[in-house]
Image (cartoon, rainbow, N blue to C red):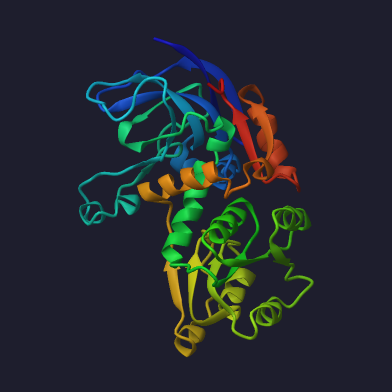
């Protein structure tokens, strides 16, 4: 057995970094030596105790990762030892109606690796081989740790059927909102970001986006002026707030597609009349599919996502507790990474 270092969530906003035994890959599995792992909003929900009933008090979290294949289980031929990879952290049942219809990412019994199983905040992570995507040899491993959240954005933009030249409003300029904006711009959209946090607005502006602070400016009026009275053909609701839901119909053009990206803690009130009046479409979007991962890899390789600006801090695994505490209180962080192991 191989002894590794892993971080365990213990409840009450606490992580313990301890020595444990790496899980040897069974048939159909691969052991990956983790390089970097990002802290995402779901991980912060775990940290705050909001998911204790699901994850328990002895869970290694983390899924936004990059790594190198360390060992291969029996029957695996899709990857080789030494290859750079990322994990698409979804394990489906293959038996439910969604799986049989080809929609495995919304499997009725979907397991999300790093929540329903142990995740990537450990030096060696053993996962099903079908979750792996191989990376180009020259892709930086810290940049590769962004592929999972970029894949979320790729899925959202693909479902929106965004066409080049269309006006886009992204409501919410946090990590996913910024990535949605960059992927939408890469697809040819004319993007405006609505955000209330001045630090996030500054990052969006640094990335070259037009921005509106709806606390200071009438957002629907600003979008009407920006689009010549037309409104936005594509709207992404990424804020998870009632004001964001109010805005998503107010800024939409006739026949607009609205993509619900955010997970709302409470049922929001939606102006359904606008869907009738202007024939709007509301689309749900959940995680990603394999093609979204491949698109995310391509966009990061091409520079369509400014990884160096998005990654605002990197901490060693030993400092995971301080990293979560800092992210919880920091007004400036966009994407925080944990350096779990070696880059190569």
**Total number of numbered labels?**
0
Which of 122 and 229 lies nearest the eye of the viewer? Answer: 229
Rendered residue at 48%/82% (across/down) = 272
Q: In this view, does 91 lie above or below 71?
A: below
Left or right: residue 174 compared with residue 80? right
Q: Quadrant of residue 222?
A: bottom right
Rendered residue at 57%/74% (across/down) = 248
What x and y, as percent, mark residue 218? Answer: 73, 78
What x and y, as percent, mark residue 33? Answer: 46, 22
What x and y, as percent, mark residue 202? Answer: 77, 55
Which of 103 and 48 lies nearest the eye of the viewer? Answer: 103
Which of 214 and 205 lies nearest the eye of the viewer? Answer: 205
Point out the residue furthest to the bottom here: 277
Residue 186: tell me if it is visible: yes
Q: In this view, does 158 lie above or below 253?
A: above
Which of 47 and 220 lies nearest the eye of the viewer? Answer: 220
Left or right: residue 332 compared with residue 271? right
Q: Quadrant of the N terminus?
A: top left
What x and y, as percent, mark residue 279? Answer: 44, 85
Q: Is residue 318 above or below residue 102?
A: above
Q: Is residue 288 above or below residue 37?
A: below
């Amino acid at each position: 057995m191989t002894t590794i270092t892993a971080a365990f969530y213990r409840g009450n906003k606490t992580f313990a970094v301890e020595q444990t035994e790496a899980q040897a890959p069974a048939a159909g599995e691969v052991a990956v030596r983790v390089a970097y792992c990002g802290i995402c909003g779901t991980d912060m929900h775990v940290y705050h105790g909001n998911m204790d009933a699901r994850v328990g008090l002895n869970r290694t979290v983390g899924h936004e990762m990059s790594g190198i294949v360390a060992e291969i289980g029996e029957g695996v031929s899709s990857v080789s030892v030494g290859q750079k990879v990322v994990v698409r952290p979804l394990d489906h049942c293959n038996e439910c109606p969604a799986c049989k219809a080809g929609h495995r990412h919304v499997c009725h019994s979907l397991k999300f690796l790093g929540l329903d199983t142990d995740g990537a905040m450990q030096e060696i992570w053993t996962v099903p081989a079908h979750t792996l995507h191989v990376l180009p040899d020259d892709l930086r491993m810290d940049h590769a740790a962004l592929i999972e959240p970029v894949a979320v954005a790729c899925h959202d933009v693909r479902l929106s059927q965004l066409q080049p030249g269309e006006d886009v409003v992204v409501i919410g300029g946090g990590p996913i909102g910024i990535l949605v904006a960059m992927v939408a711009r890469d697809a040819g959209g004319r993007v405006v970001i609505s955000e209330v946090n001045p630090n996030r607005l500054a990052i969006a502006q640094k990335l070259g986006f037009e921005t509106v602070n709806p606390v200071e400016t009438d957002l629907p009026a600003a979008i009407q002026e920006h689009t010549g009275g037309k409104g936005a053909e594509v709207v992404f609701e990424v804020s998870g707030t009632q004001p964001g839901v109010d805005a998503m119909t107010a800024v939409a053009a006739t026949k607009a597609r609205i993509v619900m990206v955010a997970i709302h803690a409470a049922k929001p009130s939606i102006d359904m009349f606008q869907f009738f009046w202007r024939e709007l479409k509301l689309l749900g979007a959940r995680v990603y599919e394999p093609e979204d991962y491949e698109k995310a890899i391509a966009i990061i390789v091409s520079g369509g996502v400014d990884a160096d600006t998005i990654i605002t801090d990197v901490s060693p695994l030993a400092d995971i507790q301080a990293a979560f505490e800092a992210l919880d209180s920091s007004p400036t962080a966009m994407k925080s990474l944990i350096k779990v192991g070696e880059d190569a």
